[in-house]
Amino acid sequence: MKTSREIRCCVLMAVGSVAALPTTAAYAQDAQPGDFVTAPAGTQLGLVYYLGSTSDNFVDAKGNDVPASSLDTNVLLLRYVYYFDVAGVRADVNVLQPFGGLHNMRLGGRKIGTKEFTPGDLTLVGTVWPLNDPKKGRYFGIATYLTLPTGDYSATRPGLAANRWSVAIQPGFRFKIAPKWSVDLVGGTTIYGDNHDGAGATTIRKDASYTALGWLNYQASDKTTLSFGGITNRGGAETIGGVKGADVTSTTVRADWSQMLNPTTQFLIEVGHDVEAKNNFKRDATLTLRLAKFF
């Protein structure tokens, strides 16, 4: 049984660190199957995502459950992508804007007020593909994410906004292993600026975080793809007012179905479940819905 002091410590770290959890996990260090497959130069792509999760368990830095804890997330993400060539090399630019927030947040029985629907931080992305070989189904791209502190931030009510700059570098490799089978392998490193507006005017510093993910894809038909994979996140320990917390970790297994509705429209559904978490909410279920339209 945790003492009240330990519970208060967990609350402090959770309020400081959970604000960026949905957006970071959902897109800044994540990738769906085929994200590193290029489109022809001049192609424009508009995407709408729904990103949801539910948790009834917080796991502390020592791996112990904190009873009477919960968190639900609901995020709407708008994304625009444009593909072009630079000196014969395929590239793209992205703009991502999330909206939404956190719901039903409790830690050790203590209810924490949250921002339930506000704009999150704007993210700008640029990707280049040193390897772009559609004939052999091989692609290698390097994406750079720049997240700006543009969202609706509160020091005491966690939401999507983190009130800090961050930069993520994400290399991704897509290759075929059989006529109907392919693999996506993606890594990522994110570095963070300081948030000087923490609770009580404290400064919150955040260590770098690291991500690795993979997908095994089966091309069931020209229109349908089934994928199975996992993602793990490590790092991101926060120092709040000179007190350093522990790294945040999570590992999620997931399955994905994508379907071409017509030659220019794709629908994707993805479900997942956390099999590991430390200093983090362990999610019982995650859900991603995505509608993509090519122009």
Image (spheres, rainbow, N blue to C red):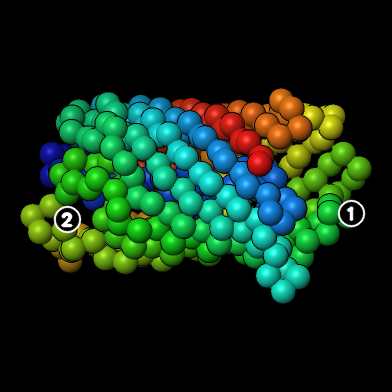
Mark number for residue 156? none
Residue 128 drawn above or below residue 123: below
Amino acid at pointer 1:
Lys
Would residue 169 be seen by someone viewing this image from the given angle?
A: yes
Residue 199 in picture, x, y percent from top left: 13, 52
**Percent coordinates x, y for residue 272 in the rendering:** 55, 32
| Residue 50 % position (x, y) | 48, 31
- Image height of 77 relative to 124, above or below: above
The CA span between labels 1 and 2 is 51 Å
Q: Residue at x 23, y 61 (%)?
A: 195
| Residue 102 percent across, percent down from the top left | 31, 33
Looking at the picture, tell me which residue is in the foreground, 181 or 96: 96
> Label 2: few (<14), some or many (≥20) within 10 Å?
many
The residue wearing badge 1 is 135
Find residue 165 and report its image quarter. Answer: bottom left
Q: Decide which of 69, 155 is in the foreground and name it.
A: 155
Q: Looking at the rendered structure, which numbered label has been put on residue 198?
A: 2
Q: Report crowding for label 1: few under 14, some 14 to 19, many 20 or more residues within 10 A (C-alpha).
A: few
Q: Quadrant of the N terminus?
A: top left
80 on left or right of 223: left
Amino acid under disc 2: Gly
Helix, strand or loop at disc 1? loop
**Earlier-in-chain disc, 1 versus 2:** 1
**Quadrant containing the C terminus in the rendered view:** top right
Asked whether, in this view, residue 126 is left or right of residue 206, the answer is right
Residue at screen point 43% across, 54% down: 123
